[in-house]
Image: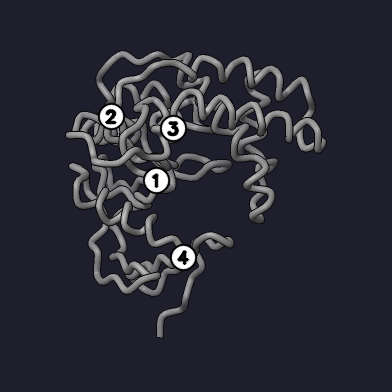
Amino acid sequence: MDEVEVVVAHSERATLRVGEVFLKVDADQARIDAEVEAMSLAPVPTPEILWRRPPVLALAALPGRTLGRLGGPSTGSRAAWAAAGAAIRTLHDAPLPPRPGRAGRSVVALAAELDAECESLVTNGVLPADLVTRNRRVAEAALRPWTPAFTHGDLQIAHVFVEGEEVTGIIDWSEAGRGDALYDLATFTLGHEEHLDDVLAGYGTDVNREVIHAWWSLRSLLVVRWLIEHGFDPFAPGCEVDVLRSRM
């Protein structure tokens, strides 16, 4: 009998692997609905849906392996990173999905969330005030008008599978929808700044690197407290706090 591997688990959702099947358990039916809808619309490889019995979604495993993880070394070649950039561009150029995604929050709402989170991080002694203040200033560049694109919304490198120089699939679409394309590019290269040039070479169009840098700061500031509260360590080498320190 295959062993059950806990891929990720916290109070909101869990993902288990049993052999070649991934079981996603999510109490929020809307997130599962959004994921299934996004996978049906995305013009890039996605996992095969084997069955769905709320609150569980069963997905087939993808061939290949991920490009790495936040806080760890990259396992992919420069060509593989470029191939991922090309796949991201294909997604961003696709017809817009019907609903906004995680990357589609309004500038006003995002600024209010960022201000509240920065105040909490300093008031509760989670991060030094100078680190928060500096990154809040860097993050300001992300708070600008943007043209909606089909975005993944949680495009961590651990969610993109490659085999050689080919992208074999992208997983975890629950945050997908209309949003800021540079949010995806920033999320994908977070903690792996050395591969930004490779990704953009595959993406194939000029982008504002200052905005990508801003999203690195903004995204990291917003998730530090959540990660701590859900049993993750943003202070681990190469993770979110190190990303913030790199902007100093």
Type of residue at label 1?
A: Glu
Type of residue at label 4?
A: Ala
Q: Position of residue 127 (x, y in %)?
A: 76, 32
Question: Going 65% across and 42% down the picture, which residue do you hit?
Answer: 234
SS class of the residue under badge 4?
A: loop
Task: Report how far apart the C-alphas of labels 3 and 2 lie in the structure.
Answer: 13 Å
Closer to the chain start, of discs 1 and 2, is 2
Establish if 20 lies above or below 197: below
Question: Going 56% across and 24% down the picture, which residue do you hit?
Answer: 111
Type of residue at label 3?
A: Arg
Q: Are marks 4 and 3 in contact (CB under 8 Å)?
A: no
Disc 3 target residue? 105
Closer to the chain start, of discs 4 and 1, is 4
Establish if 34 lies above or below 56: above
Image quadrant occupied by the N terminus = bottom left
Residue 203: image tag? none
Q: Are marks 4 and 1 in contact (CB under 8 Å)?
A: no
Report which quarter residue 21 is drawn in.
bottom left
Disc 4 target residue? 27
Disc 1 target residue? 175
Closer to the chain start, of discs 4 and 2, is 4
Q: Position of residue 148 (x, y in %)?
A: 30, 26
Disc 2 target residue? 149
Closer to the chain start, of discs 4 and 3, is 4
Q: Nearer the viewer, mark 4 or mark 2?
A: 4
